[in-house]
Amino acid sequence: MPLVRIDLRKGKDAGYRERVGQAVQDALAGAGVPSDDRFQIIQEHDEDGLVFDRGYLGIARTDDFIAIQITWSEGRSLEQKRALYRAIADGLHAQVGLRPEDVFINLVEVKKENWSFGDGEAQYAP
């Protein structure tokens, strides 16, 4: 049920983008998301289209910065979220050599009735 938006700077090849998407999907699967539940938007930006602070909270970021926003249904514990953050950062490092400092993750939690996967229906609504 997650919708994943991945934003990065232009200049990476299609293989890099695919490995990034797969690393995020693998981490989500480790958090209990079905492996075939994959909905991702991967968007590249010019330098002025992806703005980030290079030192916010004492974390040194580079041009390889990636912003990942995951919209999913509410209900996971803080421990599950922390494990997901770590799994994404570790997976991106393993798959494409991305520094964990360059991985920004934002979770958006919504009620289950806020999803329609097609046919104009709320498949998860009670």
Image (cartoon, grey):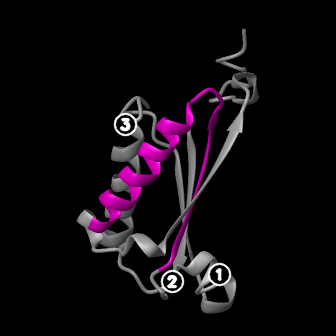
Extreme-bottom residue of the structure: 47
> Vertically, is 38 above or below 61?
above
Extreme-top residue of the structure: 126
The residue singled out by tag 1 in the image is 52
The residue singled out by tag 2 in the image is 61
> Going 51% across and 42% down the picture, which residue do you hit?
81
On-image quarter of the C terminus: top right
Where on the picture, by quarter, is residue 99? bottom left
Q: CA distance from mark 3 to mark 1?
A: 28 Å
Nearer the observer, 122 or 23: 23
On residue 29, the disc is 3
Q: Nearer the viewer, mark 3 or mark 1?
A: 1
Where on the picture, by quarter, is residue 37? top left
Give x and y (percent) for residue 54: 59, 87
Q: CA distance from mark 3 to mark 2?
A: 27 Å
> Going 44% across and 31% down the picture, which residue do you hit?
33
> Vertically, is 12 above or below 119?
below
Q: Does the stretch in magenta take in 118?
A: no
Are the residues flagged by discs 2 and 1 in contact, CB closer than 8 Å? yes
N-terminal label among 2 and 1: 1
Give x and y (percent) for residue 41: 55, 57
Over which residues does the magenta segment extend?
65-93
> Going 63% across and 79% down the picture, which residue do you hit?
56
- For badge 2, the amino acid type reads Arg
Q: CA distance from mark 2 to mark 1?
A: 8 Å
Give x and y (percent) for residue 19: 31, 62
Q: Secondary structure at mark 2?
A: loop
- For badge 3, the amino acid type reads Ala
Q: Secondary structure at mark 3?
A: helix
